[in-house]
Image (tube, rainbow, N blue to C red):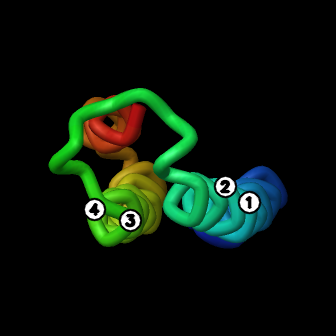
Amino acid sequence: MNLSKSPSNIVLIGILAINIVVTLIHYSDNAIHLASYPGPAWFSPFGVMAIWVVMTLLSPVAYWLYVRRQFIAAYLCLGIMH
């Protein structure tokens, strides 16, 4: 069975795409308004966006592992992101 073309995986790709757009907006807002949040003084807007990049790169890796039925590794990638 080719999981990558199943209807549920097409929906999953759509959800991943929406997630990337929504988290970009969210993290950009956090970076712009970083001074409004409590936190360590050393944390910067660049750091906020760097974390978004790392988390975003893990999304397609988790999907790739999932479609290859390597579920534990995919879940670990998702766990790292959250």
The percent position of residue 19, horizontal first and vertical second, equals 69, 57
Task: Say which residue label 3 marks.
Answer: 45
Q: Earlier in the sequence, mark 4 or mark 1?
A: 1
Q: Tell me the crowding category of disc 1: few under 14, some 14 to 19, or many 20 or more residues within 10 angstroms, Cα based.
A: few
Residue 1 seen: no
Direction from residue 2 to residue 10 in the image, left or right: right
Amino acid type at circle 3 is: Pro
Q: Earlier in the sequence, mark 3 or mark 2?
A: 2
Label pair 3/2, CB-CB below 8 angstroms: no
Q: Secondary structure at mark 1?
A: helix
Q: Which residue is mark 4?
A: 47
Q: Secondary structure at mark 3?
A: helix
Is mark 1 in CB contact (under 8 Å) with mark 3?
no
Say which amino acid is labelled 4.
Gly
Assign the N terminus to one quadrant of the image: bottom right
Residue contact at pointers 4 and 1, CB within 8 angstroms = no
Q: Which of the 4 image quadrants contains residue 28?
A: bottom right
